[in-house]
Each structure stands twice: as structure tokens, then as C-alpha cells.
Image (cartoon, coloured by chain):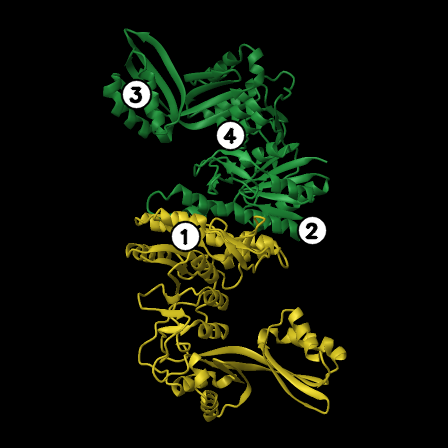
Chain colours: A yellow, B green
Amino acid sequence: MSLIVMKFGGSSVGDAERMKRVAKRVLERKQEGNRCVVVVSAMGDTTDDLIDLSKQIVVGTPSTREMDMLLTTGEQISIALLSMAIQSIGGDAVSFTGWQAGMRTEAVHGKARITDIQPKRVLDALDQDKIVIVAGFQGMTDDGEITTLGRGGSDTTAVALAAAIKADLCEIYTDVDGVYSTDPRIVKVARKLKEVSYDEMLELANLGAAVLHPRAVEYAKHNQVQLVVRSSFTYNEGTHVKEEAVMEQGIVVRGIASDKNVSRVSILGVPEKPGQLAKVFGALAAEKVDVDIIVQGGVRGGEADTSFTLASSDLEKALVILRRIQPEVGFNDIQSQSGLVKVSIVGAGMVSNPGVAATMFAAISELGVSINTVSTSEIRVSCIIESEKLADVVRALHTAFGLDTTEQAFVGGPSERR
Amino acid sequence: MSLIVMKFGGSSVGDAERMKRVAKRVLERKQEGNRCVVVVSAMGDTTDDLIDLSKQIVVGTPSTREMDMLLTTGEQISIALLSMAIQSIGGDAVSFTGWQAGMRTEAVHGKARITDIQPKRVLDALDQDKIVIVAGFQGMTDDGEITTLGRGGSDTTAVALAAAIKADLCEIYTDVDGVYSTDPRIVKVARKLKEVSYDEMLELANLGAAVLHPRAVEYAKHNQVQLVVRSSFTYNEGTHVKEEAVMEQGIVVRGIASDKNVSRVSILGVPEKPGQLAKVFGALAAEKVDVDIIVQGGVRGGEADTSFTLASSDLEKALVILRRIQPEVGFNDIQSQSGLVKVSIVGAGMVSNPGVAATMFAAISELGVSINTVSTSEIRVSCIIESEKLADVVRALHTAFGLDTTEQAFVGGPSERR
């Protein structure tokens, strides 16, 4: 008998029919002899509908405390309905809000982090052989304020709860049936991975693979929670995410990720004095501009050039900040380029396989695409390239690293994230 | 500086525009120098929409615990939006769910009674000069279960909270601008009452005057909470509900209430033995058939006839129960009549004015209407009559007791109850 946490996102419970299907799925898992805790997100468009309602009433930005009060109703509706749905097909279920399930968070609204979990009520209900339904994405501060966990919230709720109750497995049900070697919408011969390590998953998640939120993966790694990513629509075996993932024979790259809408900014002629770079990136961070790859060239004549990449949506904001601090930092010029993409290869096997980066560069060059910027980690190589040939590049890399398969990928509805 | 509880029902906050109007109204009250606590219901159709959603998922009756979990989101949405709306026009507001406001209830779902109020957070927020918004209709058990108060819930929340925080006044905002001498839709010359006593209001509320729930009036009487019923759409002075209401010169009847869809059941030839009536009405009560007026005639030849009235919607159910117990109780026959109405006159002045009932009977007889059944209390006389001439009867009584006025009544949208 295993103790399992099952997490269903918003599109899995998007309407009454899907909610009933999830109820059936949960009851089956229970009837197989498992003890089940289910974490569920708000139904489909509920969150967007609530945000729209707030916009009809408030011009500008509403208080984050009241937004949390508003948005947490979405998950509360889901847990009540899922509990009813399970009861109506003969299961014994009970629902808990975040605060009832003991999810304590820091006193921040809109993006609180979990500080502690006191899952007494969850454990008591499990002892009574009940299926426990918990609202994702939400918690309570020590002062009894309702909070939300921000992006990736329901994944994080599931993983954190799995750690707190020492679950054997945390199953993330989503609209794809696992983690793929790359986006199956781009590469038809993408391979579903049987296993992937926490570190690899973290790189893939950070690089835009939407199946799991990086924060949840980090939490899982830190607490050694075994994850499975699987489809809520099929019974296909999913992808296991764990500490040590077995590499298939002859394969060093686990997956290929790509990220559109990348821009690059170059700051030319930064005077070579201590603290100049800190000033530049401190000013950007202070206004929440998220910088990705930073490249610092050599120093020539007491001056250096620095480049960095960022999401294109932040480009305008970054340029305004840079122009403001230009007199103080004393650089000569700012150049920028948008319409770029980032393509990355990820695999724990790279560490012991020299030449992986060279293979990547060669595959890209053969398509006549020039590489703008490169960044590497122990298990990842990322290249910034111009965007027109992105799909071709991903396909070429997929083939070059021996990832092509003949299996047909299952791809469901729109990706879900919360 | 007064401490005021303001209660707004579902139709007062039915959409974004109305919500903004309520926000303005609340802020005005605050700027007049009052400390304000606002109790609010779910927006317009929210509750019905949530019930519909549950019906798409569950066939039959869902668990009352999960229904409470589901329905309490309606008020939570309202408090968040109202708080935002007040903030956006410059007020300092904070919202609390029922459990955050300290509304403790018995451990019953769907119709819990308030057992205790621990309004520490409400008082703290008032001390910080905030406008406090509290979700009506909901509370929490000692075990941390979310409950609802059932019918009249938000009125009761407002009155109970007013008592707990020792408010100077509890204002019930509704879609009519006060309590009328009778339904202004039936009698155009209905008179808005300046004052009405708790007991009178209780009789009127029980008799179907929809402006205030009887349970809230009882709670107000018990705790001596001064109420004002007023319109959320106009600034007209409302009706004060208090212990001693001043009667206008020469008026003994405060108001006239009517209730449609009444049926009458007669049980003929009940053997005269102790306990027979208890058996009959015990069986009806056990299946939640609400009996109104009971008339027991004299005993003839060891047998008696008993009649009672009830809502027509319960008639079929009552007849089934009576037929089932007929062999055991041993009466001869059951007769029933539907299509009746109840018309009542209410006024504390009746006690010291003999002849009020006679005036009522005469006014009804003059219209050629025969009186089927009569019931009286110290401050009320009710007559059951056939329904065709109800409006004429109410108008005749209104004139006979000197209640006609020349003022035009304000009547808003559909009546709100929750």
C-alpha cells in the first residue's frame, strides 16, 4: 500500500465532464490499494474570470492581499466539486483549503513561499481511510492571512505536501503524457523520457519545458520526493523524475529545450573599475528585470564590453534603466537586438563526454545559422541564435544526439501552469 | 462617532457597477465620522451558478459539508471585490472571511447556528481605522470546518456581529427603502413605517415580509441591536426596528402581511385519547412538514376534528404521512383544501384596543369573502381566506385601519434573501 499525492492542473478539471473523469481516476488509484491525497488547481478559466471581475471594479493594480482573497476561491470551488464527484461514485472524500491542510507560508501576498506544513488534518483523514482533496496554490500566514504561492503554485503544493506526509510518490497529472526529449509540436519524432534526474528536469523546466514548474522540481530535489509526470487523459506510463536517472545506451543528451522571444543587450565601453557591473545588474534587478546569460568580454584600453540576454518583453524597460544609469556608470553606448531564440541541450551525461558542445555547434552551423552567444553549465549548453530557423535547429540537434524515436507522442490540450 | 454595521445583500452587489456604488456608499458613511463594518452576501446569481455547477457533477444530493465549502466562495469573492473597490476610491479596507472574523458556529452544515463570536481581528482592524468587510452567511466550527448559516444568513451575520462588537446601529441595506405597512406592489398607498418594534417586525417577517429574516430579528431583539432597514439605491430614511416603537396617533395596526399558497388539512373523527395529537404532529415534524395554524374543535361522542394549515408545497407530503399513520391513530377521514391565503394584521397597539379583530372580520365580510380559519397572538390576527380576492382584502384592511398615505413608495428590483 503506497501513499500517493496526485496533482491535477486547471485544464484537467476544466469542466464538469473532466472533473468527473478525474474523480474516476482518483477512485481507481484508491481501489488499487493506495492511500491518496489529491491536490487540485482552479477549474480552467476560473482564475482569469476572477481577474476580469476585479478589473471591472478596480482601475490599476488591486491590493495583493485582496487578490489572494479573491483568487483562492478558485481552488476552493475545485476541491468542493471534486470531493462531491468522488463521493457520488462511491468514494469517501473530504476537501481541505490550504489553511485547513496546514500549508503555512511567509507573510507575502501573491507569491508566498511555504514555510511549514502542519498536515494533521490530512493525516487524520487518511487514517480514516478517506481520499483527501487539498486546494493547490494557497496557504495561510501565522497571522491567519490567506496567501497564494504564485506561479507553479499547485505543483509546489503537491510536492511540499508529499514531502511533509512522506508520500511514496507524487504524481503530476498534466495534458501531456510525460517529459519529452523536446517539444513534440516541433519535432514529431520526440522521445518520451522514462526517467530524468532532478537536475536535468530543473534545467529543462527553467528552459521553458512547461510540464513542471522549476520551483516544484527544486523542492522535490531538496526533499527527495519522487515525481511522476503523466497524462490525465491516458493511462500511458509517465516520466519519473528522481535523483539518479538511468541513461539509455549511447545517449548523453536527455533533452532539447528552446525558448522564444529572447533579446540581447550590449553595453559598450564600460570603464574598467571595480563595482561597475554590480551597478548595472543591481539597477536591473531592483526593477525586477530578469537577466539570463551574461557575457563579459576582455578588457581593451581600460574599457570592456558586456552583453546579456533577457526576455523580449523586458527589453524596453531594461533600455530605459540603462539610459538612466549611463551617466553614472560611464559607458559609451547601448546596442540591442531582439527576435532571438535560445536553444539548449541538457543531460547529466555531458559531464563525462567531451565534445558535446562541439557536436552542437557543428549541427547548428551546418544549417547556416550563426551562434550569437553561448552559455554552459555542467549539464547544459545553451546557444542564442536568430529565430527563423529554430524548428530546423531543434530537429537537427535531436537527430545529432540520437534522440529520434518512432513512437508517436501524445499531445493533449493547452499546457497548464498553476 | 458611531460604530455601524452595514449589511448589503446579493442584489445590492449584483454586478461591478453596483459593487462600486456600495463602495461609495460605505466610504461616505466612513467619511461622516463613523467606524464601519460591512457584511456582504454573494453577488447576484453567484450562489445559483455554484449550485448549478454542483448539479452538473453530482446526481442527487451532494454532501452538505462540501456544499458549504463550495457556496462560501460566493461571499469570499464579494468581500475581496468590495474591499478592492473601496481601496480604489481612497478608502482603507480589509476583508475577512467568516472564520477570520471569528464567527463560530455549531457543527452542522447548511444551516448552522452561531455559537460564539471572537471578533478580535475585526476590532483590531477598526482600531487601525480600517473599514472592515466581513463575509456574510458563513462561519467555522471549533474543529475548523467551514459552515453556512442557512436562510437569512447574512442578516444574521450582521446582527450577531453588531451585538458582539457593541455597534450603535446595524443598517440592513436592501432593494426597498424600508418596511411598509403592506406590500406596495399590492397597495399603492402603502405607508413606509418610521419605526417598528422587534415583536411586530418578527410577526411581519414570519408572515412573509421579505425585508428581514425572522432569525435576524430574533437575534436583534435578544441582544437589543438597533436595526435600520433602508435602500441601497436611495438616500431615503429607512425604518428603525427597536424595542419600543412609537405608534402614530390613532393607529393601532402597524402593518398588514399576506402569504399566498396556503393549504388546509382537516382530520375528522380523531378518537379522544391522550397523545393522539402528539402522534399526528410528531409524524409531520419528523419529516420537516412545517405546520402553521392548528385549530382543534370540541369533542363530540369521544371524537374530535382537527385542522391545520401549511404551505401548499408541503400538502402532498403531509397527506402521504397522514394516510400512513391513519390506522395507528384511528381517525375517520382526511380532507384538504388548497388555493387559500393568509392575511394578517400586526400591531403592538392591539393589546389595549379591543375590537380590532372585529373590525378586521367586518372589513373582510363586506367584500363577500368568508373566513375559513382564524388565529391570534397578542399583537397579530391572521385569517385564512380563499385567494381570489386577496388584493382587495389587503386594500380594504389597509384603509379600515387608517394606514393609507399619499406618499409614493420606492420599490426596487427583486427582493434579496441571504
Q: Residue tagged by mark 4? A: B215
Q: Which residue is mark 3?
A: B335
- Host chain of mark 2: B
Whether labels 3 and 1 belong to a single chain: the reply is no
Mark 4 chain: B
Residue B330 pos. (x, y %): 25, 17
Q: How many marks?
A: 4
Q: Say which amino acid is labelled 1.
A: Ile
Q: Look at discs 4 and 3 and give the one toward the viewer.
A: 4
Residue B371 vs residue B368, the one in the foreground: B371
Label 1 sits on a secondary structure element that is strand
Check disc 2 and report the residue beneath it.
Answer: B90
Distance Cα–Cα, label 2 vs label 1: 39 Å
Q: Are marks 3 and 2 on the same chain?
A: yes
Q: Chain of mark 3?
A: B
| Residue topped by disc 1 | A133
Residue contact at pointers 4 and 2, CB within 8 angstroms: no
Q: Say if B401 sits above or below A401 in the image.
A: above
